[in-house]
């Protein structure tokens, strides 16, 4: 397929349909409404079903039902809507159901605003819903990467029987970039013989459930989930290393922020400052080891985020005290500009000399 | 050789119910199971269990089952039915689940005319959590969170779900029944059968509300509870057909 120019939100829809997603349950919220609108238009043409739910709560529970019935299914929303979906996400993880959830993050807390933000990092990577669960969280930085990760996300969900979250922000959702829908690397996906499809001639009933009233049983179930999360941690880490051969300082940034950081890196280069970038692509599992490994090469680390400092906690865990870790962020829908990042870098290096 | 005159329906698993003595959930489970067996759809039925006393329904019905979050059964059933339009999908929900935390989900599933059957068991109280006031608790009825009796000025008057949902275009069949006598049980089974038949024929959303007892949390003997239901609940929640679309009539 030749490259076509697509808006991020619509590219998500095209990639999902291409990946064989047959059901989309959603609820309108800015800045991701182009996606359900695209799905309402395009899914019927592909023999797929779009249904607008009465709320985000209902939408995620429709996802639960459809995933439990064996379908490839997704939903999308933005921050306040994702908060509403947390109940369902916890149940989906508990009942071991595969699905893809897209969060086009906006400023918060509360109703916040509708401009780009990364302040749902904690919610996405540290639980969000109740209970001991994890989900793979992928943070693309371009429309091309968005479609690549979305398509792979369905396979990851099916492989582990676990929800996968793709996070972006309004910039990624609204920007137009050339994109080519590419099949992900083939994975060995297990058959969905656990799905509720009617017993037919199966000879036993299938039950989708996350209730284990006996604490010993519940612990056993949690340990089974943990073994799965350990596998994800081992297999699903993704990151980009950029300009890290001989850096004075390494910046950690993900998603659209990482692109702004790359501009700041070029500006620093002009002034003789060598700045590296570690860009986590999987926010969970987080590439802690990479930070520890590169801690020997740089004087300091700087986490740049569109938040008041969330990923920086994981960066600190990764660097593990070997070097100082600084933070610079804008929040509430304000976007960091390269010159401010450059100024922050100079401030740190000036102080570290 | 002895003649077999009665046996457990194939619609139920060979497991003892956990329900309290005198609770009518057991009868209602059996009616649903018998109807699924008699219609020959056990192997294509997918049920959704609620949160509440009947949370373990997935252990009892002999068909594929999903356990839903509190109140969300109609949304879960919507997801299932949209994936498998040729299957028979039902929810089994209590009054806390359906008439309180899950009102949005039931109203909108009914509005969309989702081709599912909802068995709504109304016993006017939260049973599983220990007898708290439900939206269906009668005015003056005592519960652990209405210790002096439900006060209309404080907690409002109980919600009548069948009447409310009957105002929508989506439902094909809505009837309120009870199971306090053999005659009522026969009528209840007929209603449940009619609802499933309407679903199978693709006519729209169907719901059977079953007035049920909770001897434990009402603080009554099973027999007293049956009489209390007849004398107090039926006058406020009259039995009968609330919606039968032209096609179902």
Image: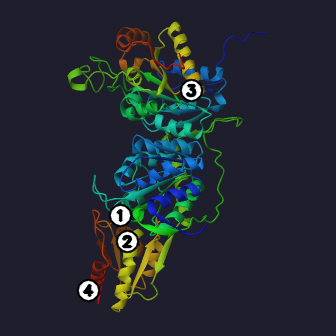
Can you tell which of label 2 and label 4 is closer to the viewer? 2
- Which of disc 4 and disc 1 is earlier in sequence? 1
Query: Of the numbered discs in the image, which one, if any, rests on residue B217?
Result: none
| Residue contact at pointers 2 and 4, CB within 8 angstroms | no
Pointer 2 residue? A257
| Residue B114 x, y percent position in the rendering | 50, 32
SS for dot 4: helix
Judged from this view, the residue extending furthest toward the left is: B153
Pointer 3 residue? B199
Real-space Cα separation, disc 2 to disc 4, in angstroms: 24 Å
| Residue contact at pointers 3 and 2, CB within 8 angstroms | no
Query: Of the numbered discs in the image, which one, if any, rests on residue A118?
Result: 1
| Residue contact at pointers 2 and 1, CB within 8 angstroms | yes
Question: What is the image's colouring?
Answer: rainbow
Can marks 3 and 1 be said to lie on one chain? no
| Residue at 34% across, 65% down | A310
Pointer 4 residue? A351
Judged from this view, the residue extending furthest toward the right is: B1
Real-space Cα separation, disc 3 to disc 2, in angstroms: 51 Å
- Which of disc 1 and disc 2 is earlier in sequence? 1
Q: Tell me which chain the residue with mark 2 is part of.
A: A
Real-space Cα separation, disc 3 to disc 4, in angstroms: 73 Å
Real-space Cα separation, disc 1 to disc 4, in angstroms: 28 Å
């Amino acid at each position: 397929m030749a490259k076509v120019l697509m808006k991020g939100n619509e590219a998500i829809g095209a990639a999902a349909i291409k990946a064989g997603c047959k059901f989309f349950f959603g609820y309108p919220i800015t800045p991701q409404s182009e996606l359900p609108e695209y799905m309402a238009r395009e899914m019927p043409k592909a023999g797929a079903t779009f249904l607008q739910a009465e709320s985000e709560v209902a939408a995620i529970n429709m996802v639960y039902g459809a995933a439990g019935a064996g379908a490839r299914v997704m939903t999308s929303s933005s921050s306040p809507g994702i908060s509403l979906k947390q109940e369902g996400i916890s149940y989906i993880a508990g009942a071991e159901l595969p699905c893809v959830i897209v969060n086009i993050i906006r400023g918060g807390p509360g109703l916040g605003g509708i401009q780009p933000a990364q302040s749902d990092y904690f919610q996405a990577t540290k639980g969000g819903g109740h209970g001991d669960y994890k989900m793979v969280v992928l943070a693309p930085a371009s429309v091309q990467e968005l479609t690549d990760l979305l398509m792979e996300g369905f396979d990851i969900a099916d492989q582990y029987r676990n929800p996968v979250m793709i996070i972006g922000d309004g910039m990624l959702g609204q920007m137009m970039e050339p994109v080519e829908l590419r099949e992900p690397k083939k994975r060995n996906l297990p058959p969905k013989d656990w799905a509720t499809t009617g017993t037919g001639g199966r000879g036993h009933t299938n039950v989708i459930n996350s209730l284990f009233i006996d604490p010993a049983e519940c612990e056993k179930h949690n340990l089974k989930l943990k073994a799965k999360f350990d596998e994800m941690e081992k297999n699903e880490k993704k990151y980009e290393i950029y300009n890290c051969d001989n850096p004075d300082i390494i910046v950690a940034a993900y998603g659209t922020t990482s692109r702004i950081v790359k501009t700041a890196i070029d500006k620093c280069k002009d002034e003789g400052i060598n700045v590296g970038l570690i860009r986590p692509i999987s926010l969970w599992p987080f590439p802690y080891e990479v930070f520890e490994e590169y801690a020997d090469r740089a004087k300091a680390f700087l986490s740049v985020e569109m938040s008041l400092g969330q990923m920086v906690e994981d960066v600190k865990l990764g660097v593990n005290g070997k070097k100082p870790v600084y933070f610079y962020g804008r929040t509430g829908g304000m976007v960091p500009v390269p010159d401010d990042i450059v100024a922050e870098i100079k401030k740190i290096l000036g102080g570290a000399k | 050789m002895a003649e077999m005159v009665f046996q457990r329906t194939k619609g139920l698993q060979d497991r003892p119910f956990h329900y309290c003595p005198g609770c009518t959930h057991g009868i209602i489970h059996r009616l649903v199971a018998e109807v699924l067996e008699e219609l020959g759809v056990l192997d294509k039925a997918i049920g959704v269990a609620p949160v509440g006393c009947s949370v373990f329904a997935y252990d009892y019905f002999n068909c594929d089952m999903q356990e839903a979050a509190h109140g969300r059964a109609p949304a879960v059933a919507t997801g299932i039915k949209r994936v498998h339009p040729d299957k028979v999908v039902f929810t089994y929900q209590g009054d806390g689940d359906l008439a309180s935390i899950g009102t949005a989900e039931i109203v909108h599933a009914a509005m969309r005319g989702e081709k599912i059957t909802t068995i709504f068991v109304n016993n006017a109280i939260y049973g599983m959590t220990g007898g708290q006031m439900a939206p269906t608790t009668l005015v003056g009825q005592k519960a652990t969170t209405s210790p002096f009796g439900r006060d209309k000025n404080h907690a409002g008057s109980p919600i009548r779900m069948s009447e409310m949902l009957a105002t929508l275009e989506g439902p094909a069949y809505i009837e309120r029944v009870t199971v306090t006598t053999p005659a009522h049980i026969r009528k209840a089974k007929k209603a449940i059968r009619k609802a499933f038949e309407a679903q199978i024929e693709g006519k729209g959303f169907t719901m059977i509300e079953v007035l049920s007892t909770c001897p434990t949390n009402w603080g009554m003997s099973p027999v007293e509870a049956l009489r209390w239901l007849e004398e107090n609940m039926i006058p406020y929640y009259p039995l009968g057909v609330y919606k039968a679309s032209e096609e179902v009539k």
